[in-house]
């Protein structure tokens, strides 16, 4: 018996605003800190299960504001990245981390090969299939999707405070990131915005960009927001407003296709 999710828990993928007319497609792999019942607590404390190691606090809320404003579709994962990190391929050990920042994850260390396979099959593959399908459907109907993956990061990492506030991340395709960074450099918004920080391609965080953006030839960007900026609804709205400007300016500057 390697089944992971129960019928009552439902599937791993949530799609909002599926019939949206806008070109943006928002993807939030770390939207939730929910664990499947069958995994219990993975041996973690309540504090760890509420922290950034389990999810990206605020990221889904920012996505929802943006999806509404930009009439965009939003796809998010309904279970914690501690179960399976959908921004990592199955061959990566980081997909089911045994250590996350300063926390050991006992439930991942003790997992059998069959249990890991169930996580790939029930959490990752349906997510990959859903996002890939949305992109190919749009392309088949003559529309150009623009992929935006949304994340948040902890202000203090391994005891070190981070001063970067918003990261604009890309892999080999920097078309959209370049234009967003150019837009960010105009005027003084007060945010500390950087390219490929606090993570970049070398940290293995661009799996979704490669899988859903580069593989399909669609413009793509990953946004990382320091989570203290989006702790409450006011913060989430302020950052979403700002990102809306960067995204629309960035896309408008792309060559028409
Ligand atoms: Zn994330």
Image (cartoon, rainbow, N blue to C red):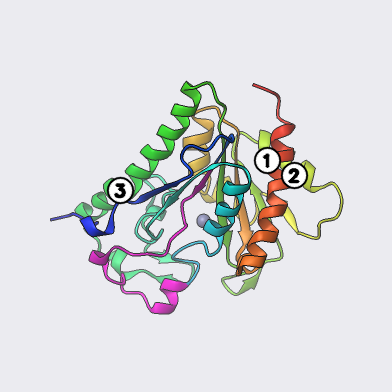
Q: Which residue is mark 2?
A: 181
Q: Quadrant of residue 172?
A: top right
Say if disc 2 is inside 8 Å of ligand 1: no
| Left or right: 182 as drawn, with respect to 65 | right
**Disc 2 to disc 1: CB gap under 8 Å:** yes
Reply above or below: 229 against 135. Answer: below
Q: Residue at x 57, y 27 (%)?
A: 144
Residue 142 sits above or below residue 76 on the image: above
What residue is at 47 percent from the left and 56 percent from the top? 30
Which residue is most to the left? 1
* Disc 2 packing (10 Å; few <14; some 14–19; many ≥20): some
Q: CA distance from mark 2 to mark 3?
A: 35 Å
Judge by depth and name the residue closer to the eye, 11 or 197.
Answer: 11
Magenta stretch holds residue 124 = no
Instruction: Name the disc covering residue 177, or none.
Output: 1
Label of residue 20 in the image: none
Q: Residues within 10 Å of mark 1 (few under 14, many from 20)?
A: many
For the residue labelled by badge 2, is the local secondary structure a helix, a strand or a loop?
helix
**Nearer-the-camera pick, 225 or 200:** 225
Element class at badge 1: helix
Dividing the picture into quadrants, the one containing residue 137 is: top left
Residue that badge 3 annotates? 120
Q: How far apart in space, not on screen, are marks 3 and 1 (Cα)?
A: 30 Å
Asked if residue 28 lies in the magenta stretch, the reply is yes
Magenta range: 26-50
Percent coordinates x, y for residue 75 in the rendering: 46, 46
């Amino acid at each position: 018996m390697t089944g992971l999710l129960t019928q009552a828990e439902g599937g791993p993928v949530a799609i909002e605003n599926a019939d949206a007319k806008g070109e943006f497609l928002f993807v939030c792999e770390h939207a939730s800190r929910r664990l499947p019942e069958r995994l219990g607590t993975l041996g973690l404390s309540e504090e760890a299960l509420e922290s950034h190691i389990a999810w990206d606090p605020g990221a889904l809320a920012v996505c929802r504001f943006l999806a509404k404003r930009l009439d965009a579709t939003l796809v998010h994962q309904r279970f914690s990245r501690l179960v399976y990190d959908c921004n990592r391929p199955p061959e990566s050990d980081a997909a089911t981390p045994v250590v996350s920042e300063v926390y050991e994850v006992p439930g991942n260390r003790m997992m059998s090969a069959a249990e890991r396979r169930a996580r790939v099959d029930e959490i990752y593959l349906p997510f990959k299939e859903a996002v890939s399908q949305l992109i190919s459907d749009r392309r088949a109907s003559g529309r150009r999707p623009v992929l935006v993956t949304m994340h948040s990061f902890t202000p203090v990492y391994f005891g070190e405070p981070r001063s970067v506030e918003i990261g604009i991340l890309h892999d080999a395709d920097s078309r959209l990131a370049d234009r967003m960074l150019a837009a960010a450099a105009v005027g003084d918004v007060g945010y500390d915005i950087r390219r490929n920080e606090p993570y970049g391609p070398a940290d293995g965080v661009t799996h979704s960009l490669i899988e859903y953006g580069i593989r399909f030839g669609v413009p793509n960007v990953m946004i990382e927001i320091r989570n203290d900026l989006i702790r409450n609804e006011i913060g989430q709205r302020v950052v979403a407003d700002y990102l809306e400007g960067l995204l629309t300016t960035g896309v408008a500057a792309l060559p028409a296709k």
